[in-house]
Image (cartoon, rainbow, N blue to C red):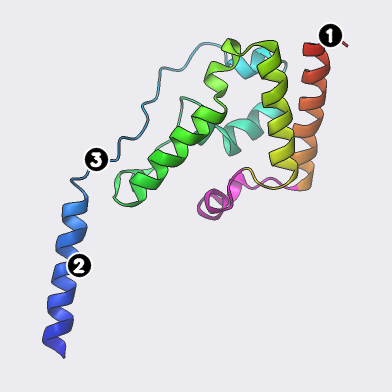
């Protein structure tokens, strides 16, 4: 029985090592710009702090890849989540969005944050400081409402 367990462990270790050679293709980061584009959209320091803490790893070109981001198969999931997040909303490309698209993105932010869909639960589990309590959700909702009114010219 010990021999089977030992052989099984060796096989698992070999598979784990081989998996490290399968590329994860983590999305690349771009250089930090002098002024954050979401700051241009009148986000105050409190809003920016929340966005940077809870959103930027998946929704900007400034992802903080931690050590485990480079270990398969976790790296594959992180690559998938970051690509999907950037496609849905990218604060680094905020200034490229049309007014119509900005209003839609802002509405999506408010809806997903208020429902607790963002940040993702698995992300908050691994990064406890990213969880949004009711006060932070209210800050984001207020900012979204103000920005939407400004964009709509009201």
- Check disc 1 and report its element: helix, strand or loop: loop
> Marks 3 and 1: CB-CB under 8 Å?
no
Q: Quadrant of the C terminus?
A: top right
Q: Which residue is mark 2?
A: 12
Mark 3 residue crowding within 10 angstroms, few (<14) / some (14–19) / many (20+) = few
- Check disc 2 and report its element: helix, strand or loop: helix
Mark 1 residue crowding within 10 angstroms, few (<14) / some (14–19) / many (20+) = few
- How many discs mark residues in the rendered view? 3
Give the Cα distance between marks 2 and 1.
Answer: 60 Å
Q: Which mark, residue 134? A: none
Give the Cα distance between marks 2 and 3.
Answer: 19 Å
For marks 2 and 3 on the same chain, the one whose residue lies earlier in the sequence: 2
**Residue drawn at x 46%, y 27% as measured from the top left:** 62
**Residue drawn at x 24%, y 40% as measured from the top left:** 23
Which range is magenta? 119-133
The percent position of residue 28, horizontal first and vertical second, equals: 36, 26
What secondary structure predominates along the stretch shown in magenta?
helix
The percent position of residue 138, horizontal first and vertical second, equals: 80, 38
Mark 2 residue crowding within 10 angstroms, few (<14) / some (14–19) / many (20+) = few
- Quadrant of res 99: top right
Q: Which residue is mark 3?
A: 23
- Left or right of 99, for residue 63: left
Q: Which residue is mark 1?
A: 153
């Amino acid at each position: 029985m010990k021999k089977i367990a030992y052989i099984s462990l060796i096989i698992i270790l070999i598979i784990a090592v081989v998996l490290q050679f399968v590329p994860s293709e983590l999305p690349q980061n771009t250089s930090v710009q002098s002024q954050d584009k979401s700051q241009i959209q009148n986000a105050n320091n409190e809003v920016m702090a929340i966005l940077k803490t809870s959103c930027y790893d998946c929704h900007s070109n400034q992802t903080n890849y931690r050590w485990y981001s480079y270990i398969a198969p976790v790296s594959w999931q992180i690559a998938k989540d970051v690509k999907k997040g950037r496609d849905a909303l990218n604060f680094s490309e905020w200034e490229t969005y049309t007014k119509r698209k900005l209003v839609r993105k802002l509405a999506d932010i408010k809806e997903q944050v208020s429902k607790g869909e963002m940040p993702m639960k698995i992300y908050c589990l691994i990064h406890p400081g990213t969880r949004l309590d009711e006060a932070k959700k209210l800050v984001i909702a207020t900012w979204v409402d103000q920005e939407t009114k400004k964009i709509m010219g009201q």
